[in-house]
Image (cartoon, rainbow, N blue to C red):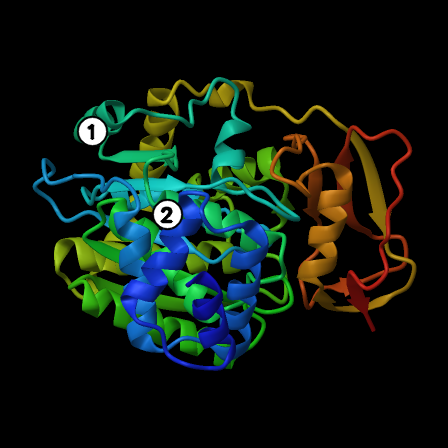
Amino acid sequence: MILDIISKKANKYELTKEELETIFMGYLNDEVKDYQMSAFLMAICINDMSDSEVFALTDIFIKSGDILDLSFIDKIKVDKHSTGGVGDKTTLIVAPLVASLNVPVIKMSGRGLGYTGGTIDKLESIPGFRVSLTEEEIKKQAQDIGIVITSQTKDLAPLDKKVYALRDVTATTNSIPLIASSIMSKKIAGGADKIVIDIKVGCGALIKTKEEAERLSSLLIKIGTYYQEEVRTVISNMDRPLGHNIGNKLEVLEALEVLKGNVKGELLDLSVELASKMVSMGKGINESDARKEVLESLENGKALNKFLEFVKYQHGNIDDLEIDAKVYNIKANKSGTLKNINALSIAKLSESLGAGRKSKDDDIDYNAGVVIKKDIGDEIKEGDLLASLYTNIDNPKFNLDGIFEIS
């Protein structure tokens, strides 16, 4: 039966929900082997899935575990997801910003696997911060302060978690249907009423082309409609890093500076755009009015205060957040205009310093990372400081080829 299902997808036939359920639930229950599921996932990557297959798979993922019941909160709950990028710390800015405007944010996030840490890694870099909360703790915190960010519980979409781990080591991460089902199953199971999704596109992202990003956007919205959930998307550039800091503690510090009003540019602009969509959906107002509220919350300090309240509630001590690492300065070897900063190359550099993990069991050095000192378009003189590298690796080897394009 399993071989028949794999063969059917390999030969470009559409599968029924029962067939998808047989192979995927069989995998969750250890009746389908890794090599069989790997072959099946590769067949999906090569031959794609129909919309009805995607809807069915999303439903299978959702029903493989618990669904978080947030109905005790009488306001609209809006969640935000990013497909992942280099220096993407927007959740740390957007979640408290939205919560400061009385729109509840209850978010389950993950760890990073690859060049940089995930949201949970960044929060865990704050001394004392608790990332694992029980359902009771989530509910109490949501009622008390209107914002929770916690690691995904083992009972929430466990099938997606198991399949994702296999996709990561079998070169099957770039299937648009699999990405869409993975994102939406977790968001719906997590109890969100409305969802904003930031689709990263470029060399430093999973999605490489605008066409792929637009297809993913369309599919996410279709899945939302199927489940009567409003979904809005933003397609954002990941050919260059987002912000100046790459690395876990470093990114928390930059997020804090944005909330303090000390950082302008692309990171702030994207955070405001995402927050405005979330507030618009949560309050039922247009995005222009929501944007005014968002900017006001940044200017009057309410967003910063909500961030500090959130960190303290989850036992974090932001005052103890200090970088403990050796610093290596990278200087320009020629003069000219800074034309580009390659996101993928920066990500690989950051990982080599200890800021990322190659396997799920690897330890991350929360202090490691890169701080970029120049912006694209800046005039550069030979000897100018381009970046500071933070690491606890003795005599690290840096491959700086192709990172800074100066001409």
- In the displayed structure, does residue 271 sit left or right of residue 379? left
Task: Note whether 345 is above or below 337 in the view shown.
Answer: above
Residue at the spot x=60%, y=38% of the render?
Answer: 360
Question: Which quadrant is home to the N terminus?
Answer: bottom left
| Dots 2, 1 in contact, CB < 8 A | no
Residue 287 picture quarter: bottom left
> In which image quadrant can residue 161 be found?
top left
Residue found at x 77% / y 43%:
352
Tell me if I can see residue 276 in this picture: no
* Residue picked out by circle 1: 139
x and y, in percent, of residue 294 in the image: 29, 52
In the image, 294: left or right of 70?
A: right
Residue 57, percent from left and from top: 33, 62
Task: Give the numbered dot on residue 94.
Answer: 2
Residue sitting at x 50%, y 73%: 7
Q: Work out whether residue 395 or residue 4 is closer to the camera in this orientation and state it.
A: 4
Between 60 and 383, the one nearer to me in the picture:
60
Disc 2 from disc 1: Cα separation: 20 Å
Residue kind at label 1, given as amino acid type: Lys
Q: How packed is label 1: few (under 14 Cα within 10 Å), some, or many (20 or more)?
A: many
Mark in the foreground, 2 or 1: 1
Residue occupying the far front of the picture = 1
Which quadrant holds residue 216? bottom left
